[in-house]
Image (spheres, helix red, strand yellow):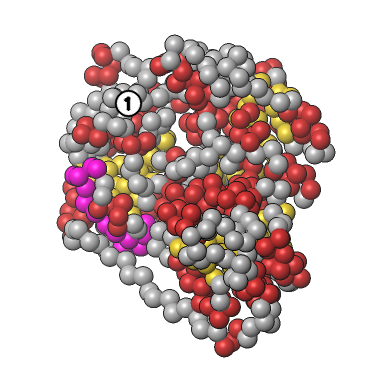
Amino acid sequence: MKSSDYIATFLRDQGIGTVFGYMGGMITHLADSLDKCQGIQFIQTYHEQTASMAAEGYAIGSDGIGCAISTSGPGATNMITGIADAYFDSVPVLYITGQVNSYEYKYDKPIRQQGFQETNVVNIVKPITKYAVLVDDAQNLRYELEKAVYIAKEGRKGPVLLDITMDVQRTDIVPEKLRGYDARSCKNNSDDVGLEALWNVIEKAKSPIVLLGGGCQTKETSQLLNNFFSANQIPVVTSLMGRGAMDETYEYYIGMVGSYGNRCANITISQADLLLVLGSRLDTRQTGAKIDSFLKEGHIIHVDIDENELMHHRIENQLHVRMTVADFLKIIKSNHISFHPSLKWLDYVVRIKEQYNQNREIDRFVENKAPYRFIQALNQIMEEGDIVTTDVGQNQMWAAQTINLKKGMKFITSGGLAPMGYSMPAAIGLNFADATHKIYCICGDGGFHMSSQSLGVIAQYHLPIKIMVMNNTSLGMITQFQHLYFENRMVGTTRDGGYVVPNLEYMAKAYGLRYARILSDDLQDNSRFKGIVENSDVVEYFIEGLTTVCPKLEYNQPIENPLPFLPESEREKILFKS
Protein backbone atom coordinates (compact mmCIF):
# COMPACT_ATOMS: atom_id res chain seq x y z
CA MET A 1 0.00 0.00 0.00
CA LYS A 2 1.32 3.42 -0.90
CA SER A 3 2.11 5.54 2.17
CA SER A 4 0.01 8.48 1.02
CA ASP A 5 -2.96 6.14 0.52
CA TYR A 6 -2.46 4.90 4.08
CA ILE A 7 -2.43 8.48 5.39
CA ALA A 8 -5.71 9.24 3.61
CA THR A 9 -7.47 6.17 5.02
CA PHE A 10 -6.02 6.86 8.48
CA LEU A 11 -7.44 10.39 8.46
CA ARG A 12 -10.83 9.13 7.30
CA ASP A 13 -10.87 6.52 10.04
CA GLN A 14 -10.24 9.27 12.60
CA GLY A 15 -13.58 10.80 11.58
CA ILE A 16 -12.04 13.50 9.40
CA GLY A 17 -14.29 13.93 6.38
CA THR A 18 -12.64 17.05 4.97
CA VAL A 19 -8.99 18.05 4.65
CA PHE A 20 -8.17 21.66 3.78
CA GLY A 21 -5.10 22.81 1.93
CA TYR A 22 -3.47 24.45 -1.06
CA MET A 23 -1.95 22.28 -3.73
CA GLY A 24 1.84 22.17 -3.97
CA GLY A 25 4.64 20.00 -5.26
CA MET A 26 5.52 18.24 -2.01
CA ILE A 27 1.94 17.11 -1.28
CA THR A 28 0.96 15.88 -4.73
CA HIS A 29 1.00 12.24 -3.60
CA LEU A 30 -1.09 12.99 -0.52
CA ALA A 31 -3.62 15.18 -2.35
CA ASP A 32 -4.02 12.52 -5.05
CA SER A 33 -4.60 9.86 -2.39
CA LEU A 34 -7.19 12.00 -0.64
CA ASP A 35 -8.97 12.50 -3.94
CA LYS A 36 -9.14 8.73 -4.55
CA CYS A 37 -10.17 7.79 -1.00
CA GLN A 38 -13.86 7.21 -0.34
CA GLY A 39 -15.34 9.10 2.61
CA ILE A 40 -12.89 12.00 2.67
CA GLN A 41 -12.41 15.06 0.49
CA PHE A 42 -9.69 17.60 -0.20
CA ILE A 43 -10.80 21.24 -0.34
CA GLN A 44 -8.53 23.70 -2.14
CA THR A 45 -8.66 26.94 -0.14
CA TYR A 46 -6.55 29.32 -2.28
CA HIS A 47 -4.32 30.21 0.65
CA GLU A 48 -2.68 28.04 3.28
CA GLN A 49 -3.69 30.40 6.10
CA THR A 50 -7.32 29.86 5.13
CA ALA A 51 -6.70 26.11 5.21
CA SER A 52 -5.12 26.20 8.65
CA MET A 53 -8.01 28.21 10.14
CA ALA A 54 -10.70 26.25 8.30
CA ALA A 55 -9.26 23.12 9.93
CA GLU A 56 -9.81 24.82 13.29
CA GLY A 57 -13.43 25.52 12.42
CA TYR A 58 -13.86 21.92 11.32
CA ALA A 59 -12.46 20.62 14.63
CA ILE A 60 -14.75 22.91 16.61
CA GLY A 61 -17.82 22.06 14.54
CA SER A 62 -17.24 18.31 14.57
CA ASP A 63 -16.16 18.20 18.22
CA GLY A 64 -13.27 16.12 16.91
CA ILE A 65 -10.00 16.82 15.13
CA GLY A 66 -9.33 18.90 12.02
CA CYS A 67 -6.66 18.53 9.36
CA ALA A 68 -4.88 20.87 6.95
CA ILE A 69 -2.04 20.15 4.55
CA SER A 70 0.48 22.24 2.66
CA THR A 71 3.60 21.92 0.60
CA SER A 72 7.06 22.68 1.97
CA GLY A 73 8.64 26.10 2.35
CA PRO A 74 6.20 28.95 1.73
CA GLY A 75 3.20 26.63 1.97
CA ALA A 76 4.22 25.58 5.46
CA THR A 77 5.10 29.08 6.62
CA ASN A 78 1.77 30.41 5.35
CA MET A 79 0.01 28.00 7.73
CA ILE A 80 1.86 29.21 10.82
CA THR A 81 -0.68 31.85 11.85
CA GLY A 82 -3.45 29.24 11.94
CA ILE A 83 -1.22 26.77 13.76
CA ALA A 84 -0.44 29.36 16.44
CA ASP A 85 -4.12 30.25 16.71
CA ALA A 86 -5.04 26.61 17.27
CA TYR A 87 -2.33 26.34 19.91
CA PHE A 88 -3.41 29.34 21.96
CA ASP A 89 -7.11 28.46 21.72
CA SER A 90 -6.54 24.73 22.39
CA VAL A 91 -8.03 23.41 19.14
CA PRO A 92 -6.99 19.87 18.09
CA VAL A 93 -5.72 19.99 14.51
CA LEU A 94 -3.32 17.71 12.65
CA TYR A 95 -1.20 19.79 10.28
CA ILE A 96 0.69 17.84 7.62
CA THR A 97 3.41 19.54 5.61
CA GLY A 98 5.19 18.01 2.67
CA GLN A 99 8.97 18.08 2.80
CA VAL A 100 11.65 17.57 0.17
CA ASN A 101 13.01 14.06 -0.34
CA SER A 102 15.08 12.88 2.60
CA TYR A 103 18.14 12.59 0.37
CA GLU A 104 17.75 16.31 -0.49
CA TYR A 105 17.27 17.48 3.09
CA LYS A 106 20.25 19.26 4.67
CA TYR A 107 19.84 17.86 8.20
CA ASP A 108 22.89 19.14 10.18
CA LYS A 109 24.88 20.53 7.29
CA PRO A 110 25.93 24.13 8.00
CA ILE A 111 24.18 25.46 4.88
CA ARG A 112 20.96 27.39 4.61
CA GLN A 113 19.19 25.10 2.20
CA GLN A 114 19.87 22.05 0.08
CA GLY A 115 16.54 21.13 -1.53
CA PHE A 116 14.26 23.53 -3.39
CA GLN A 117 11.76 25.12 -0.94
CA GLU A 118 13.33 23.11 1.88
CA THR A 119 12.51 24.65 5.26
CA ASN A 120 12.97 23.27 8.76
CA VAL A 121 9.32 23.75 9.61
CA VAL A 122 9.48 21.42 12.63
CA ASN A 123 11.83 23.68 14.56
CA ILE A 124 9.84 26.74 13.51
CA VAL A 125 6.54 25.43 14.90
CA LYS A 126 7.73 23.59 18.01
CA PRO A 127 6.87 26.52 20.32
CA ILE A 128 3.30 26.64 18.94
CA THR A 129 2.44 22.93 18.75
CA LYS A 130 2.00 20.14 21.26
CA TYR A 131 4.11 17.88 19.06
CA ALA A 132 6.03 18.33 15.81
CA VAL A 133 8.30 15.84 14.07
CA LEU A 134 9.97 15.12 10.75
CA VAL A 135 8.85 11.79 9.28
CA ASP A 136 11.69 10.67 7.01
CA ASP A 137 11.32 6.91 7.44
CA ALA A 138 8.18 5.14 6.21
CA GLN A 139 8.60 2.54 8.96
CA ASN A 140 7.71 5.23 11.51
CA LEU A 141 4.63 6.52 9.67
CA ARG A 142 1.92 4.62 11.55
CA TYR A 143 3.55 5.33 14.92
CA GLU A 144 3.83 9.07 14.28
CA LEU A 145 0.29 9.42 12.91
CA GLU A 146 -1.22 7.62 15.89
CA LYS A 147 0.97 9.50 18.36
CA ALA A 148 0.18 12.90 16.84
CA VAL A 149 -3.59 12.38 16.89
CA TYR A 150 -3.48 11.08 20.48
CA ILE A 151 -1.43 14.08 21.66
CA ALA A 152 -3.70 16.55 19.83
CA LYS A 153 -6.79 15.27 21.65
CA GLU A 154 -5.31 14.28 25.03
CA GLY A 155 -5.39 16.64 28.01
CA ARG A 156 -5.43 20.27 26.99
CA LYS A 157 -6.07 19.96 23.29
CA GLY A 158 -4.01 21.60 20.60
CA PRO A 159 -2.29 21.37 17.21
CA VAL A 160 0.35 18.85 16.13
CA LEU A 161 2.43 18.78 12.95
CA LEU A 162 3.95 16.02 10.88
CA ASP A 163 6.49 17.08 8.27
CA ILE A 164 6.56 14.14 5.83
CA THR A 165 9.24 13.85 3.18
CA MET A 166 8.29 13.29 -0.45
CA ASP A 167 10.00 9.90 -0.65
CA VAL A 168 8.14 8.64 2.42
CA GLN A 169 4.81 9.67 0.89
CA ARG A 170 5.38 7.57 -2.21
CA THR A 171 6.91 4.52 -0.49
CA ASP A 172 5.01 1.21 -0.48
CA ILE A 173 4.31 -0.09 3.03
CA VAL A 174 2.48 -2.92 4.79
CA PRO A 175 0.56 -1.04 7.53
CA GLU A 176 -0.04 -4.15 9.63
CA LYS A 177 3.70 -4.67 9.94
CA LEU A 178 4.40 -1.12 11.11
CA ARG A 179 4.66 -0.42 14.83
CA GLY A 180 1.80 1.47 16.39
CA TYR A 181 1.69 4.00 19.21
CA ASP A 182 0.81 2.70 22.67
CA ALA A 183 -1.31 5.51 24.07
CA ARG A 184 -1.09 5.86 27.80
CA SER A 185 -4.15 6.72 29.85
CA CYS A 186 -4.35 10.25 31.17
CA LYS A 187 -5.37 10.41 34.81
CA ASN A 188 -7.24 13.42 36.05
CA ASN A 189 -6.51 14.48 39.57
CA SER A 190 -6.71 17.32 42.02
CA ASP A 191 -3.24 18.43 42.99
CA ASP A 192 -3.27 21.20 45.52
CA VAL A 193 -6.34 20.78 47.65
CA GLY A 194 -8.53 17.95 48.86
CA LEU A 195 -11.99 17.76 47.38
CA GLU A 196 -13.56 17.90 50.85
CA ALA A 197 -12.09 21.36 51.36
CA LEU A 198 -13.62 22.43 48.04
CA TRP A 199 -17.05 21.18 48.98
CA ASN A 200 -16.84 23.08 52.25
CA VAL A 201 -16.06 26.34 50.43
CA ILE A 202 -18.83 25.76 47.88
CA GLU A 203 -21.55 24.95 50.37
CA LYS A 204 -20.72 27.90 52.63
CA ALA A 205 -20.74 30.49 49.84
CA LYS A 206 -23.69 32.91 49.95
CA SER A 207 -22.83 34.97 46.87
CA PRO A 208 -21.17 32.53 44.46
CA ILE A 209 -20.68 32.95 40.72
CA VAL A 210 -19.35 30.69 37.95
CA LEU A 211 -17.03 31.77 35.12
CA LEU A 212 -17.05 29.61 31.99
CA GLY A 213 -14.08 29.62 29.62
CA GLY A 214 -13.04 27.99 26.38
CA GLY A 215 -12.48 24.67 28.16
CA CYS A 216 -16.25 24.30 28.44
CA GLN A 217 -16.95 24.15 24.70
CA THR A 218 -17.13 20.39 24.06
CA LYS A 219 -20.58 18.96 23.42
CA GLU A 220 -20.39 16.74 26.50
CA THR A 221 -19.35 19.61 28.75
CA SER A 222 -22.03 21.90 27.35
CA GLN A 223 -24.74 19.35 28.15
CA LEU A 224 -23.35 18.79 31.64
CA LEU A 225 -23.34 22.55 32.24
CA ASN A 226 -26.96 22.92 31.20
CA ASN A 227 -27.90 20.10 33.57
CA PHE A 228 -25.80 21.68 36.32
CA PHE A 229 -27.52 25.05 36.05
CA SER A 230 -30.91 23.38 35.92
CA ALA A 231 -30.14 21.83 39.31
CA ASN A 232 -28.34 24.85 40.83
CA GLN A 233 -29.62 28.40 40.80
CA ILE A 234 -26.26 30.11 40.59
CA PRO A 235 -25.23 33.18 38.59
CA VAL A 236 -22.86 32.61 35.68
CA VAL A 237 -20.66 34.71 33.44
CA THR A 238 -18.45 33.75 30.52
CA SER A 239 -15.13 34.77 29.10
CA LEU A 240 -14.97 35.72 25.42
CA MET A 241 -14.10 32.11 24.56
CA GLY A 242 -16.77 30.73 26.87
CA ARG A 243 -19.71 32.36 25.12
CA GLY A 244 -22.22 29.76 23.93
CA ALA A 245 -20.86 27.01 26.18
CA MET A 246 -24.26 26.86 27.89
CA ASP A 247 -27.81 27.93 27.19
CA GLU A 248 -27.54 31.70 27.70
CA THR A 249 -31.30 32.09 28.02
CA TYR A 250 -30.75 30.82 31.59
CA GLU A 251 -32.26 33.31 34.06
CA TYR A 252 -29.02 33.98 35.93
CA TYR A 253 -26.71 34.29 32.96
CA ILE A 254 -25.29 37.78 33.35
CA GLY A 255 -22.96 38.33 30.42
CA MET A 256 -19.32 38.37 29.34
CA VAL A 257 -16.59 39.58 31.71
CA GLY A 258 -13.30 41.23 31.00
CA SER A 259 -11.59 44.25 29.50
CA TYR A 260 -14.45 44.64 27.02
CA GLY A 261 -16.97 42.72 29.10
CA ASN A 262 -20.51 43.73 29.92
CA ARG A 263 -20.63 46.18 32.82
CA CYS A 264 -23.26 44.09 34.64
CA ALA A 265 -21.01 41.00 34.49
CA ASN A 266 -17.92 42.88 35.67
CA ILE A 267 -19.80 44.45 38.58
CA THR A 268 -21.33 41.17 39.69
CA ILE A 269 -18.13 39.12 39.60
CA SER A 270 -16.40 41.73 41.75
CA GLN A 271 -19.02 41.31 44.49
CA ALA A 272 -18.99 37.51 44.75
CA ASP A 273 -17.67 35.65 47.78
CA LEU A 274 -16.80 32.61 45.63
CA LEU A 275 -15.71 32.45 41.99
CA LEU A 276 -15.74 29.00 40.42
CA VAL A 277 -13.58 29.21 37.28
CA LEU A 278 -14.26 26.40 34.81
CA GLY A 279 -11.89 25.92 31.87
CA SER A 280 -10.52 29.45 31.71
CA ARG A 281 -6.97 30.75 32.02
CA LEU A 282 -8.29 33.70 34.04
CA ASP A 283 -5.90 36.02 32.25
CA THR A 284 -5.69 39.81 32.45
CA ARG A 285 -8.33 40.23 29.76
CA GLN A 286 -10.75 38.78 32.35
CA THR A 287 -9.33 40.01 35.64
CA GLY A 288 -7.98 43.36 34.56
CA ALA A 289 -4.34 44.27 35.08
CA LYS A 290 -5.00 45.33 38.68
CA ILE A 291 -4.97 41.75 39.92
CA ASP A 292 -4.34 42.65 43.56
CA SER A 293 -7.91 43.95 43.74
CA PHE A 294 -9.54 41.07 41.87
CA LEU A 295 -11.92 39.28 44.25
CA LYS A 296 -9.57 39.99 47.16
CA GLU A 297 -12.31 39.33 49.70
CA GLY A 298 -13.53 36.08 48.12
CA HIS A 299 -12.40 32.56 47.30
CA ILE A 300 -11.43 31.33 43.83
CA ILE A 301 -11.70 27.70 42.80
CA HIS A 302 -9.84 27.25 39.52
CA VAL A 303 -10.63 24.10 37.50
CA ASP A 304 -8.41 23.49 34.49
CA ILE A 305 -6.80 20.54 32.71
CA ASP A 306 -3.49 22.37 32.27
CA GLU A 307 -1.30 22.07 35.37
CA ASN A 308 1.05 24.80 34.15
CA GLU A 309 -1.77 27.33 33.86
CA LEU A 310 -2.73 26.60 37.47
CA MET A 311 0.73 26.52 39.00
CA HIS A 312 2.12 29.61 37.26
CA HIS A 313 -0.85 31.92 37.68
CA ARG A 314 -0.27 35.42 39.04
CA ILE A 315 -3.36 35.31 41.25
CA GLU A 316 -2.34 33.37 44.32
CA ASN A 317 -5.53 33.08 46.39
CA GLN A 318 -6.84 30.10 44.43
CA LEU A 319 -7.77 26.51 45.16
CA HIS A 320 -6.50 24.44 42.23
CA VAL A 321 -8.30 21.48 40.66
CA ARG A 322 -6.51 19.85 37.75
CA MET A 323 -9.08 17.96 35.72
CA THR A 324 -11.47 18.46 32.83
CA VAL A 325 -14.55 20.55 33.45
CA ALA A 326 -16.69 17.56 32.46
CA ASP A 327 -15.09 15.35 35.11
CA PHE A 328 -15.44 18.07 37.74
CA LEU A 329 -19.14 18.46 37.03
CA LYS A 330 -19.61 14.68 37.21
CA ILE A 331 -17.90 14.59 40.60
CA ILE A 332 -20.09 17.41 41.91
CA LYS A 333 -23.18 15.51 40.82
CA SER A 334 -22.05 12.14 42.18
CA ASN A 335 -21.14 13.69 45.54
CA HIS A 336 -24.45 15.57 45.73
CA ILE A 337 -22.64 18.90 46.15
CA SER A 338 -24.90 21.90 45.80
CA PHE A 339 -24.61 25.67 45.95
CA HIS A 340 -26.67 27.75 48.39
CA PRO A 341 -26.74 31.34 47.12
CA SER A 342 -28.82 33.67 49.25
CA LEU A 343 -32.05 35.05 47.84
CA LYS A 344 -30.60 38.49 48.45
CA TRP A 345 -27.67 37.65 46.16
CA LEU A 346 -29.92 36.33 43.40
CA ASP A 347 -32.13 39.41 43.62
CA TYR A 348 -29.02 41.60 43.46
CA VAL A 349 -27.77 39.81 40.33
CA VAL A 350 -31.11 40.27 38.57
CA ARG A 351 -31.15 43.97 39.49
CA ILE A 352 -27.60 44.65 38.29
CA LYS A 353 -28.28 42.80 35.03
CA GLU A 354 -31.41 44.88 34.47
CA GLN A 355 -29.72 48.20 35.21
CA TYR A 356 -26.33 47.66 33.54
CA ASN A 357 -26.91 45.28 30.64
CA GLN A 358 -25.40 46.03 27.25
CA ASN A 359 -28.51 47.59 25.74
CA ARG A 360 -28.66 50.04 28.66
CA GLU A 361 -24.94 50.69 28.20
CA ILE A 362 -25.45 51.57 24.55
CA ASP A 363 -28.37 53.90 25.20
CA ARG A 364 -26.62 55.65 28.07
CA PHE A 365 -22.98 55.95 27.05
CA VAL A 366 -22.34 55.23 23.34
CA GLU A 367 -22.21 58.31 21.13
CA ASN A 368 -21.94 56.56 17.75
CA LYS A 369 -24.55 53.81 18.16
CA ALA A 370 -24.49 52.66 14.51
CA PRO A 371 -22.41 49.48 14.95
CA TYR A 372 -24.38 48.40 17.99
CA ARG A 373 -27.69 49.01 16.21
CA PHE A 374 -26.53 46.60 13.50
CA ILE A 375 -25.83 43.85 16.04
CA GLN A 376 -29.14 44.55 17.77
CA ALA A 377 -30.90 44.12 14.42
CA LEU A 378 -29.09 40.82 13.90
CA ASN A 379 -30.41 39.70 17.28
CA GLN A 380 -33.93 40.06 15.94
CA ILE A 381 -33.44 37.76 12.93
CA MET A 382 -31.10 35.07 14.25
CA GLU A 383 -32.71 31.83 15.36
CA GLU A 384 -32.05 28.94 17.70
CA GLY A 385 -29.16 26.77 16.56
CA ASP A 386 -27.50 29.45 14.41
CA ILE A 387 -23.73 29.90 14.55
CA VAL A 388 -21.93 33.24 14.77
CA THR A 389 -18.28 33.65 13.83
CA THR A 390 -16.43 36.90 14.29
CA ASP A 391 -13.20 38.35 13.06
CA VAL A 392 -10.85 40.36 15.28
CA GLY A 393 -11.15 44.03 16.15
CA GLN A 394 -14.11 46.18 17.07
CA ASN A 395 -16.51 43.90 15.16
CA GLN A 396 -15.52 41.07 17.52
CA MET A 397 -16.21 43.06 20.66
CA TRP A 398 -19.41 44.69 19.41
CA ALA A 399 -20.70 41.20 18.68
CA ALA A 400 -19.39 39.60 21.87
CA GLN A 401 -20.90 42.33 24.03
CA THR A 402 -24.25 42.58 22.30
CA ILE A 403 -25.32 39.35 20.61
CA ASN A 404 -28.02 37.47 22.46
CA LEU A 405 -27.38 33.78 21.99
CA LYS A 406 -30.62 31.89 21.76
CA LYS A 407 -30.88 28.22 22.71
CA GLY A 408 -28.41 26.06 20.78
CA MET A 409 -26.55 29.00 19.25
CA LYS A 410 -22.76 29.01 19.14
CA PHE A 411 -20.31 31.92 19.19
CA ILE A 412 -16.97 31.11 17.54
CA THR A 413 -14.06 33.51 17.65
CA SER A 414 -10.31 33.70 18.21
CA GLY A 415 -9.06 34.60 21.67
CA GLY A 416 -5.38 34.02 22.37
CA LEU A 417 -3.63 34.94 19.11
CA ALA A 418 -6.54 36.95 17.67
CA PRO A 419 -5.49 37.15 13.99
CA MET A 420 -7.43 39.31 11.60
CA GLY A 421 -8.90 37.24 8.79
CA TYR A 422 -10.18 34.48 11.08
CA SER A 423 -13.96 34.67 10.66
CA MET A 424 -14.47 33.49 7.07
CA PRO A 425 -12.01 30.55 7.18
CA ALA A 426 -13.48 29.38 10.50
CA ALA A 427 -16.99 29.60 9.04
CA ILE A 428 -15.88 27.48 6.08
CA GLY A 429 -14.55 24.76 8.37
CA LEU A 430 -17.67 24.85 10.53
CA ASN A 431 -19.89 24.45 7.49
CA PHE A 432 -17.98 21.42 6.17
CA ALA A 433 -18.19 19.86 9.64
CA ASP A 434 -21.95 20.39 9.91
CA ALA A 435 -24.00 22.02 7.15
CA THR A 436 -27.28 21.93 9.12
CA HIS A 437 -26.70 25.27 10.89
CA LYS A 438 -26.91 28.73 9.39
CA ILE A 439 -23.68 30.66 9.90
CA TYR A 440 -23.47 34.42 10.33
CA CYS A 441 -19.88 35.42 9.61
CA ILE A 442 -19.19 38.86 11.07
CA CYS A 443 -16.16 40.77 9.75
CA GLY A 444 -14.68 44.21 9.85
CA ASP A 445 -13.45 45.74 6.62
CA GLY A 446 -9.84 44.89 7.54
CA GLY A 447 -10.45 41.24 8.35
CA PHE A 448 -12.65 40.80 5.28
CA HIS A 449 -9.92 42.13 2.98
CA MET A 450 -7.24 40.04 4.69
CA SER A 451 -9.18 36.80 4.12
CA SER A 452 -10.81 37.68 0.81
CA GLN A 453 -9.53 34.51 -0.87
CA SER A 454 -12.05 32.65 1.31
CA LEU A 455 -14.77 34.09 -0.92
CA GLY A 456 -13.58 31.70 -3.62
CA VAL A 457 -14.28 28.64 -1.46
CA ILE A 458 -17.64 29.96 -0.29
CA ALA A 459 -18.72 30.65 -3.87
CA GLN A 460 -17.29 27.46 -5.35
CA TYR A 461 -19.11 25.18 -2.92
CA HIS A 462 -22.22 27.38 -2.52
CA LEU A 463 -21.75 27.44 1.24
CA PRO A 464 -24.75 28.90 3.13
CA ILE A 465 -22.63 31.45 4.98
CA LYS A 466 -23.91 34.98 5.51
CA ILE A 467 -20.92 37.34 5.45
CA MET A 468 -21.76 40.48 7.42
CA VAL A 469 -19.15 43.21 6.88
CA MET A 470 -19.18 46.11 9.34
CA ASN A 471 -17.29 48.68 7.29
CA ASN A 472 -16.14 51.75 9.16
CA THR A 473 -13.33 52.27 6.59
CA SER A 474 -10.74 52.07 9.34
CA LEU A 475 -8.97 49.74 11.71
CA GLY A 476 -11.35 50.80 14.43
CA MET A 477 -9.85 49.10 17.47
CA ILE A 478 -6.55 50.86 16.85
CA THR A 479 -8.18 54.22 16.08
CA GLN A 480 -9.79 53.99 19.54
CA PHE A 481 -6.30 53.75 21.07
CA GLN A 482 -4.99 56.51 18.81
CA HIS A 483 -7.87 58.75 19.86
CA LEU A 484 -7.22 58.14 23.56
CA TYR A 485 -3.42 58.13 23.66
CA PHE A 486 -1.95 59.54 20.42
CA GLU A 487 -3.83 62.83 19.91
CA ASN A 488 -5.84 61.42 16.98
CA ARG A 489 -2.78 60.69 14.83
CA MET A 490 -4.36 57.86 12.79
CA VAL A 491 -1.22 56.34 11.28
CA GLY A 492 -2.11 53.33 9.09
CA THR A 493 -5.71 53.12 10.30
CA THR A 494 -7.72 55.62 8.22
CA ARG A 495 -7.58 56.90 4.64
CA ASP A 496 -5.64 59.99 5.71
CA GLY A 497 -3.24 57.73 7.57
CA GLY A 498 -2.64 55.43 4.59
CA TYR A 499 -5.34 52.75 5.07
CA VAL A 500 -7.68 52.23 2.11
CA VAL A 501 -10.67 49.88 1.84
CA PRO A 502 -11.34 48.31 -1.57
CA ASN A 503 -14.78 48.19 -3.20
CA LEU A 504 -16.37 45.23 -1.43
CA GLU A 505 -19.26 45.02 -3.88
CA TYR A 506 -16.88 44.48 -6.79
CA MET A 507 -14.94 41.89 -4.78
CA ALA A 508 -18.09 39.93 -3.95
CA LYS A 509 -19.40 40.03 -7.50
CA ALA A 510 -16.01 38.99 -8.90
CA TYR A 511 -16.57 35.66 -7.14
CA GLY A 512 -20.21 35.44 -8.27
CA LEU A 513 -21.60 36.15 -4.81
CA ARG A 514 -24.77 38.14 -4.17
CA TYR A 515 -24.10 41.53 -2.59
CA ALA A 516 -26.31 43.94 -0.64
CA ARG A 517 -25.69 47.18 1.16
CA ILE A 518 -27.57 47.77 4.40
CA LEU A 519 -28.70 51.27 5.31
CA SER A 520 -29.63 52.47 8.78
CA ASP A 521 -33.31 52.59 7.77
CA ASP A 522 -33.19 48.89 6.92
CA LEU A 523 -32.37 48.11 10.55
CA GLN A 524 -35.66 49.58 11.70
CA ASP A 525 -37.76 47.00 9.84
CA ASN A 526 -37.01 43.42 10.91
CA SER A 527 -38.78 41.78 7.98
CA ARG A 528 -37.03 43.99 5.42
CA PHE A 529 -33.64 43.47 7.07
CA LYS A 530 -34.18 39.72 7.23
CA GLY A 531 -35.19 39.63 3.58
CA ILE A 532 -32.06 41.47 2.49
CA VAL A 533 -29.84 39.12 4.49
CA GLU A 534 -31.58 35.96 3.30
CA ASN A 535 -31.18 36.97 -0.35
CA SER A 536 -27.52 37.97 -0.11
CA ASP A 537 -24.16 36.32 0.46
CA VAL A 538 -22.18 39.44 1.36
CA VAL A 539 -23.93 42.16 3.34
CA GLU A 540 -22.07 45.43 3.82
CA TYR A 541 -23.02 47.96 6.47
CA PHE A 542 -21.28 51.32 6.31
CA ILE A 543 -20.51 53.05 9.60
CA GLU A 544 -19.49 56.71 9.56
CA GLY A 545 -17.51 58.58 12.18
CA LEU A 546 -15.27 57.51 15.04
CA THR A 547 -16.38 54.22 16.57
CA THR A 548 -15.72 52.90 20.05
CA VAL A 549 -16.23 49.74 22.06
CA CYS A 550 -18.12 50.41 25.27
CA PRO A 551 -17.55 49.57 28.07
CA LYS A 552 -13.75 49.32 28.03
CA LEU A 553 -11.51 48.71 31.02
CA GLU A 554 -8.49 50.96 31.40
CA TYR A 555 -5.18 49.43 32.43
CA ASN A 556 -5.05 50.74 35.99
CA GLN A 557 -8.68 50.21 36.95
CA PRO A 558 -10.37 47.35 38.83
CA ILE A 559 -12.63 45.08 36.80
CA GLU A 560 -15.85 46.67 38.08
CA ASN A 561 -14.90 50.19 36.99
CA PRO A 562 -14.64 50.37 33.18
CA LEU A 563 -14.92 53.44 30.99
CA PRO A 564 -17.10 55.44 30.91
CA PHE A 565 -16.86 55.80 34.70
CA LEU A 566 -20.01 55.82 36.77
CA PRO A 567 -20.47 58.71 39.21
CA GLU A 568 -18.96 57.91 42.59
CA SER A 569 -22.35 58.13 44.26
CA GLU A 570 -23.72 55.55 41.84
CA ARG A 571 -20.77 53.23 42.36
CA GLU A 572 -21.51 53.14 46.07
CA LYS A 573 -25.09 52.08 45.41
CA ILE A 574 -24.14 49.08 43.27
CA LEU A 575 -22.05 47.37 45.95
CA PHE A 576 -23.59 44.18 47.30
CA LYS A 577 -24.50 44.36 50.99
CA SER A 578 -24.63 40.78 52.22
- Please tell me which residue lies in front, 331 or 279: 279
Image-based side of 561 in relation to 47, left or right: left
Give, as a three-letter code, the residue at label 1. Answer: Tyr
- Please tell me which residue lies in front, 185 or 367: 185
Q: Is residue 527 visible?
A: no
Residue 125 is one of the magenta-drawn residues: no
User: Where is 223 relative to 361, above or below?
Assistant: below
Residue 320 is one of the magenta-drawn residues: yes
Q: Position of residue 93 (x, y in %)?
A: 54, 59
Residue 550 quadrant: top left
Residue ID at (32%, 47%): 277
Q: Position of residue 196 (x, y in %)?
A: 18, 60
Q: Magenta segment, which residues?
A: 314-331
- Residue holding disc 1: 555
Residue ID at (53%, 19%): 491
Residue farthest front in this picture:
110
Image-based side of 356 in relation to 530, left or right: left
Residue ID at (32%, 61%): 323
Q: Residues within 10 Å of mark 1 (few under 14, many from 20)?
A: few
User: Where is 129 relative to 511, above or below?
Assistant: below
Q: Position of residue 92 (x, y in %)?
A: 50, 59
Image-based side of 115 in relation to 339, left or right: right
User: Where is 299 relative to 196, above or below?
Assistant: above
